[in-house]
Every structure is written in structure tokens, then in C-alpha cells.
């Protein structure tokens, strides 16, 4: 799926050229994921004789999709997801239900606000999600790709994700 993924990423990056918007997406995606899975970690279901949270069951198809798009980036997202599942589970288990829902709401609002600010203030345009709903699933891949490139890996994606020169009039 490498070619498909690279084509999807090339479209996605057109809406995410400003590094400040990228930073806002890192924050927003982490907050949204943690908030979204938090209440789902409280629901446990038997799966193959083991109690598994509904959060893991619902996230599994998306995690598999990310692994199919790109094994290395998908593995990175899987690792981060495990940490975020653990954080969400710990919070949900340590606080009252009403506090958990308040934290959920705060994380979702802050996550959406970070992404909205990133697009409106730093990109000066609407989020790509409104034009391309599939971009909801590309955000984490984009962020992980940026991290891999920053660490010196994935030069194959570096050209696709490179920011435009500041004196450029082109939007690619």
C-alpha cells in the first residue's frame, strides 16, 4: 500500500505545510485520542478468553489499517497508542465517573481547539477533514512520518512532507 499511502499523504500535506500547524496537530491528536478512548477503557469485554477494553477492540481495525499503509509508521503509532491507552485507563480507573467525563470533555475540546487554531491561524484555511473525510485517519500517520523524518529515518517521505520555502508563491 506504499504508493497509495504516499499519494494520500501528498494530498494531506497540502493542508499542513506550516510547522506550527503540525505542532498543533501533534498536541491535538494526542489529546483527542486519549480523550476518546478514556471512557471506552472502562467497558471490558471477553475476547478469546481474555478481558479486553472496548477501546482496544474499536481501535484495532484502525491500527491494522495503519500497519497496512506503512509497517514502520504503523508500528510507531501502535507503540504510542499503547502508552495513550495506559494513560487513559489509569486516569479512568483513578477518578470518579463524573470527573472522567469532565476530563474527556476537556481533552476533546482542547484537541479540537488545537487543530482548529492550527488551520485557521497558521495555515489560513479550513481543515482538510471537511473536504477529505479520510484525512481523519491520516493525521496520526502524518505526525508519525514527521517524527521519523526528524529522527533521520524515512527519507522517502521527506520530499513529500517538506515545508515550502518561505519565499515561495506556490502552494504545490
Image (tube, rainbow, N blue to C red):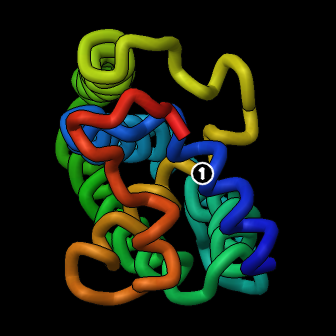
Q: Against 75, is 19 above or below?
A: above
Residue at position x 47%, y 57% from top?
142
Report which quarter residue 121 is drawn in: top left
Q: Position of residue 166 (x, y in %)?
A: 21, 37
Q: Nearer the viewer, residue 56 or 65?
A: 65
Pick the quarter of the image with the C terminus. top right
Locate residue 142 relative to residue 62 in the image: left or right.
Answer: left
Does residue 171 appear in this view?
Answer: yes
Please name the residue that numbered disc 1 is placed on: 138
**Position in image of residue 64 (x %, y %):** 71, 74
28 displayed left or right of 56: left
The residue closer to the viewer here, 150 or 143, is 150
Q: Quadrant of the N terminus?
A: bottom right
Of residue 112 and residue 36, the one placed in the foreground of this image is 112
> In this rendering, is residue 132 above or below 90?
above
Q: Position of residue 138 (x, y in %)?
A: 60, 51
Is 150 drawn above or below residue 126 in the view shown? below
Q: Residue at x 34, y 88 (%)?
A: 153
Q: Is residue 98 among the parts visible in the rendering? A: no
Residue at image position (38%, 42%) is 29
Residue 82 lies left or right of residue 9; in this view the side is left
Q: Secondary structure at mark 1?
A: helix
Residue 23 rendering spot, x and y as whole percentages: 22, 43
* Residue 85 quadrant: bottom left
Q: Is residue 84 left or right of residue 145?
A: left
Compared to residue 46, the image places residue 136 above or below, namely above
Amino acid at each position: 500500500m506504499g504508493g497509495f499511502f504516499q499519494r494520500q499523504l501528498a494530498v494531506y500535506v497540502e493542508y499542513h505545510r506550516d510547522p506550527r500547524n503540525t505542532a498543533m496537530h501533534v498536541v491535538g491528536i494526542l489529546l483527542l485520542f486519549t480523550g476518546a478512548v478514556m471512557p471506552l477503557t472502562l467497558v471490558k469485554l471477553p475476547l478469546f478468553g481474555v478481558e479486553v477494553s472496548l477501546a482496544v477492540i474499536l481501535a484495532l481495525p484502525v491500527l491494522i489499517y495503519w500497519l497496512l499503509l506503512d509497517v514502520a509508521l504503523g508500528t510507531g503509532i501502535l507503540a504510542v497508542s499503547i502508552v495513550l491507552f495506559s494513560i487513559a485507563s489509569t486516569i479512568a480507573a483513578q477518578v470518579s465517573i463524573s470527573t472522567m467525563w469532565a476530563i474527556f470533555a476537556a481533552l476533546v475540546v482542547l484537541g479540537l481547539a488545537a487543530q482548529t487554531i492550527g488551520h485557521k491561524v497558521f495555515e489560513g484555511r479550513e481543515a482538510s477533514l471537511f473536504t477529505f473525510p479520510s484525512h481523519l485517519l491520516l493525521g496520526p500517520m502524518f505526525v508519525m512520518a514527521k517524527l521519523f523524518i526528524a529522527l533521520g529515518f524515512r527519507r522517502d517521505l521527506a520530499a513529500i512532507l517538506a515545508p515550502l520555502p518561505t519565499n515561495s508563491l506556490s502552494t504545490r
